[in-house]
Amino acid sequence: MWTIKYKPKNLKEFVDQKEAVEKFLKWIKNWKPGSKALLFYGMPGVGKTALVEAYASEKNLDLIQLNASDYRSATQIREVLGRSMQQQSLFRRGKIFLIDEIDGIAGREDYGGVGEIIKIIRESRFPIILTANDPYEQKLRSLREYCILVEFKKIPVWDIEKRLAEICKKEGIKADRKVLRELAKLSKGDLRAAIIDLETVARGKDEIKLEDLKALSYREKEVSIFDALKLIFKTKSALAAKLAIRNVDKDPDEIFWWIENNIAREYEKPEEIAKAFESLSKADLFRSWVSSRQNWKLKGYMIDLMTAGIATAKKDMYRKFTRYQYPDKLAILGGTKLERKAMGELLKKLSKEFHCSTRKVRKEFLPFLKIMVKNSKIKSQLVNSLKLTKEELSLLK
């Protein structure tokens, strides 16, 4: 992708953020063991990660990078960073550590992840930089005490336009200034998004015009699920399909069921339907692994397969109108929401009585309780000992 191909290789190629760059260089010059870490913050696509990568490349440093959303517990962070923090670089001048998306780590489920990072900052023999979209979340309060905050602002339209013009020149693509200016405006200060949009409309072309930007108009407003489905099912571009769900106000797990429910309504050829469902089944595997393994980076593979995989399953675009329908599975779940909530409360109550998890109650105790309540003598004993209400008793029946 062009976002990778045209990443800045040194600080001269880095776009804008003059104030942030100056603070970074001053900090790195004066850094010594025990110093505070730097916390870069700002919206996505403004150069937080790119600045560290460009500096490491220019100074021939080993860049040790970790995404805090992927490695959420103290144990995982220690395994990835622990030894590297204490060992010298073998073949380069030194090391620099980058922990991305730190706001994706905190919370009770993270088993001391923030505490481990604080410990690493205090003990590290090398500079550490963290990145976040919002550093002022309550869960990052203790971490902020060990960091110097550096803001990355939105990149100005003219700077984005200039960078897009450079890319077009290197790719041999003719583009009017009005086209590049419009792409820059659509990005709303996000350079990475602007480069992705440029690649979306320009890949395989010698020239791009204003009418080529119509496919990107969805960025200007929140996209409805129906618009996203239309783009996924109608396009043959893997990248456009993947970007289709970017601004949809629904979780990828819910979008998964929307796609599953409408494949056969859009595609007509058996081989295309089979190929689409094969891609979706692989996406479903990654979806289950995200939950079972708590490995959130697998979510990216799930999204690729359920968008790009579906879009490229067809040979030709269908030009018919398709009325996309609400997923049957979500309709069923919606109809049983109150019942499932009540069952969840009952399982919590029983887990306290039996001193075990709700999962164990559901798997090992519930089947027998449902049999026992059918016996009138045993039922009365159960109601008294477990203090069951009429509603709870009806759930067991």
Image (spheres, rainbow, N blue to C red):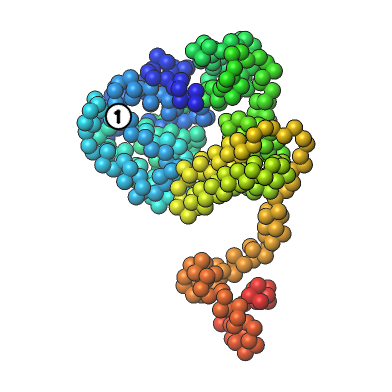
Q: Residue at x 49, y 75 (%)?
A: 354
**On screen, residue 254 above or below 194:** below
Q: Is 186 on the left-hand or right-hand side of 44?
A: right
Q: Is residue 256 visible?
A: no
Residue 56 figure quarter: top left
Mark 1, secondary structure of its residue: strand
**On screen, residue 177 above or below 27:** above
Q: Residue at x 66, y 19 (%)?
A: 212
Q: Is 171 on the left-hand or right-hand side of 183?
A: left
Q: In the image, what residue type sits under mark 1?
A: Asp
Image quadrant occupied by the C terminus: bottom right
Q: Nearer the viewer, residue 36 or 187?
A: 187
Where is residue 61? Give x, y as percent.
29, 26
Residue 252 figure quarter: top right
Q: Nearer the viewer, residue 47 or 265?
A: 265
Q: Is residue 356 visible?
A: yes
Where is residue 248? Give x, y as percent.
64, 38
Q: Nearer the viewer, residue 223 or 25?
A: 223
Q: Residue at x 38, y 26 (%)?
A: 52
Residue 188 figure quarter: top right
